[in-house]
Image (spheres, grey):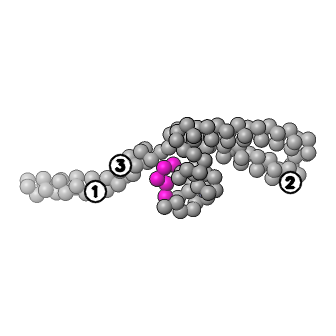
Amino acid sequence: MTLLLFSMLLALLAAAFVVRPLVARRDALLVDVAPGAVLDAEARRRVALVALKELEYDYLGGKLDAADYRTQKERLSMEALAAMRAAEAVGIESGRVAAGPDRHACGFMNPPLSRFCAGCGARLR
Ligand SMILES: [Zn+2]
């Protein structure tokens, strides 16, 4: 009986040892995430800039004629500008400035305490 209890206790300790890092990691991720508005504005800024870059590639690759390129570029530029202004406004609102510790040199705004930049992969700390 004592052996059975001892082995059950050992099994529980082993299970707790295995599961603990998973639970601790999940807690850390929940705590580290930046405010939702900041991440949302940053995502919109990046999407708008990527769309502009893809439009440029499509035009240079001959998929678009000049008239379509001009109209789409004008529309996407306005969207990108609005997204950049929104990202800047939200960043300033939440106490982050453009050159704050969370914005990497490549322009990507990383969540606080990030070890690597999610935009370019460079080591941050
Ligand atoms: Zn970066």
Amino acid under label 3?
A: Val
Residue of label 3: 23
Does the residue tagged 1 have its C-beta within 8 Å of any atom of ligand 1? no
x and y percentages locating residue 125 in the rendered image: 48, 61
Amino acid under label 1?
A: Phe
Residue of label 1: 17
Label 3 residue SS = helix
Does the residue tagged 3 have its C-beta within 8 Å of any atom of ligand 1? no
Q: Residue at x 52, y 60 (%)?
A: 124
**Magenta extent:** 110-115
Q: Give the image quarter of residue 85.
A: top right
Magenta: predominant secondary structure element? loop
- Sequence-wise, the earlier of marks 2 and 1 is 1
Residue of label 2: 60
Q: CA distance from mark 2 to mark 1?
A: 56 Å
Residue 36 in the figure: left or right of residue 20: right
The one nearer the camera, 5 or 60, is 60
- Sequence-wise, the earlier of marks 1 and 3 is 1
x and y percentages locating residue 109 in the rendered image: 58, 49
